[in-house]
Amino acid sequence: MKAIVHTSNGGPDVLSLTERPIPAPGPGEVRVRVHVSGVNPTDWKSRQGATGGPAGGTEQVPNQDGAGVIDAVGEGVAPERVGQRVWIWEAAWQRSEGTAQEYVVLPDRQAVFLPDEASFDLGASLGIPALTAHRTLTLAEGGPDRLAPGSLDGRTVLVAGGAGAVGNAAIQLARWAGATVVTTVSSTRKAELARAAGAHHVIDYRTQDAAATIRLLVPDGVDIIVEVAPAVNAVIDHAVAAPNAVIAFYANNGGDEITVPVRQAMVPNLRWQGVLVYTVPERAKADAVADVSAAVADGALRVGEDAGLPLHRFPLEKTGDAHAAVENNAVGKVLIDVAAG
C-alpha cells in the first residue's frame, strides 16, 4: 500500500511517499481503508517536533483525522463492522500510524460510524476540530457537559476566529444546541464564511470596535468564549464576558502569554480554561464523540463553501504541500484524497 512517512522532524520536505505492507488488525482493532485524510495544525506541528519525533528511525505516518471504510476487524470486534463507513479521530496520537496512508489500523472506538448521507469529506473534517469545539462549549458554569438540541438555549457564545476549522465547528455545534452565536473575523471574506456557518452576528474586528459592538448586541455579556488567540483577545474577552463566563482557549495564535486583570476577572468570577483535545478527560472525550456523531446524524455539521468551510484538496503524494497549506493559514479545510470513491 502507499503511505506517507517521515523518520525525522522538519519541514514538509521530510515527508516521503513509500510502499508498505497492508497491516493486519490485532485484538480490539479495526483496519480502515482510508478515502480522505484531514490535515490540522497539530499535524504539521507534530511533524516539526512539537510532540517529540520518530524514535530510532521509526517511520511515522502523519495526520490524526480521516474517513473511510472498515475492511477487516481483529479479535473481539463485532464482525458486522466490516463494510461500515467511519470517521477517524486521533489516529496518530502517541502512535506511529496516522491517516496519510491507504490502510490504517487503530482501536475500534476510534473509528466511528459515518451515515451514508455524510460524505467522507465531512468525516475527515470532524476529529480534532469538532471534538475541540465540543469541549470548549461544555465548560460553562452550570453546564451543559453534553450537547444536544436545546442544551445551550438562553446562552450566548462568542467564537473568536469564526472562519477557522474549530471556529466553524463551534458555530455549527452551538447553533445546533440552541445558542446565540457571535463571532469575530478579520476580513469580508471570512465574514461571509462565518455567516454561512450559521453565526447570528459577525464582527470584523479590523473595521469595528469589537468589544463595544458585542456589548451593544449582548448587553448582559457572553457566557462562553471560544478563543483561538488569547494573548491578542484577552482585553476584548474580559470586556464582553458575562458574570461566571468561561473563556475556553485552544490555541496560542498571536502569542504564548496572557495578562489577566485580576479584579476584572475576579469580581465577575470569570474562568480561563485551557483545552487540548488529546489530553481532555476520557469521559469528556467519549461524550464529545457521541455528541458530534449525533450532530452529524441530524445534519447539523457540514463542510464546503456553503457551510463556511471551503475545501482544499491534495493527492496523497502531495501531502507535504497539504501540510504547508495549513501552516500558511489556508482558509478552510485541507483534505488529502487517499483512495478514489
Image: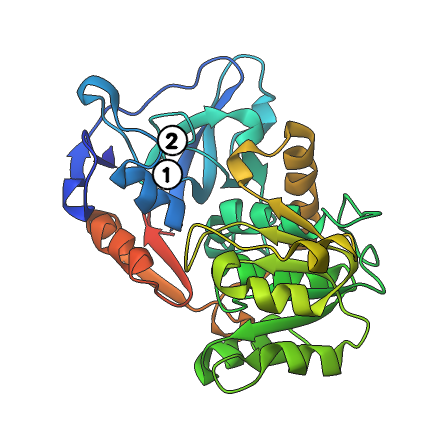
Nearer to the camera, 133 or 270:
270
Q: Position of residue 32 (x, y in %)?
A: 43, 33
**Residue beneath disc 2:** 104
| Residue at image point 45% right, 14% down | 26
From the viewer's perspective, tell me whether residue 41 is left or right of residue 291: left
Say the numbered circle drawn on residue 272: none
Q: Position of residue 260 (x, y in %)?
A: 60, 55
In whole angstroms, how far apart are the C-alphas of marks 2 and 1? Answer: 6 Å
**Residue beneath disc 1:** 99
Q: Is residue 36 visible?
A: no
Q: Position of residue 197 (x, y in %)?
A: 59, 71
Nearer to the camera, 239 or 6:
239
Name the residue type under label 1. Thr
Q: Is residue 337 visible?
A: yes
Mark 1 secondary-structure assignment:
loop
Seen in the picture, residue 212 relative to 310 is either above or below; the reply is below
Marks 2/1 in contact by CB < 8 Å: the verdict is yes
Q: Dot 1, crowdedness within 10 Å: few (<14), some or many (≥20)? A: many
Tell me the quarter of the picture where residue 287 sits.
top right
From the viewer's perspective, tell me whether residue 328 is left or right of residue 267: left
Nearer to the camera, 46 or 117:
46
Q: Earlier in the sequence, mark 2 or mark 1?
A: 1
Tell me the quarter of the picture where residue 234 sits.
bottom right
| Residue at image point 41% right, 55% down | 255
Q: Position of residue 158 (x, y in %)?
A: 66, 66
